[in-house]
Image (cartoon, helix red, strand yellow):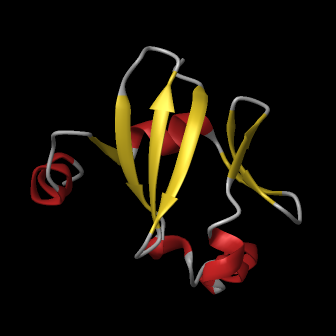
Amino acid sequence: MCLVVRVVPHENYRLEIEFNNGEVRFFDGSPYLNKGIFSQLYDKALFARAFVAYDTVCWPGELDIAPETLYSLSVPENGSATEHSQERR
């Protein structure tokens, strides 16, 4: 399993995530903004406070997303969102 070792929040609710296999991938958090507890992340200041704990991305208020979800729903650093959306179909 790939675990998160570094996270950098970017504009438009995107996360740059480095995994323990050395891969850097980009995760689009915007689809989560209208889902239950994750709607709190619509606050850009809160989203920007992302940090690594327990081998995954977390936010204050005990919010986190499983590392396997982050990995499977993210695109490689040199990939495109179009390529990724085609993979998920």
Q: Residue 7 occupies which quadrant of the picture?
A: top right
Residue at the image point whose x is 73% and y is 51% from the top: 58
Q: Is residue 42 left or right of residue 73?
A: right
Q: Residue 1 occupies which quadrant of the picture?
A: top right
What quarter of the picture does the C terminus occupy? bottom left
Depth check: give the residue in front, 72 or 40. Answer: 40
Q: Is residue 36 above or below residue 75?
A: below
Depth check: give the residue in front, 75 or 10. Answer: 10
Q: In this view, does 51 lie above or below 22?
A: below
Residue occupying the far right of the picture: 61
Residue 70 x %, y %: 50, 44
Residue at the image point whose x is 56% and y is 80% from the top: 33
Residue at the image point whose x is 45% and y is 74% from the top: 30
Q: In this view, does 21 lie above or below 44?
A: above
Residue 5 x %, y %: 60, 27
Q: Is residue 50 left or right of residue 84?
A: right
Number of callouts: 0
Residue at the image point whose x is 36% and y is 49% from the top: 26
Residue 24 x %, y %: 37, 33
Q: Is residue 62 left or right of residue 22?
A: right
Q: In this view, does 53 lie above or below 36?
A: above
Residue 69 x %, y %: 52, 43
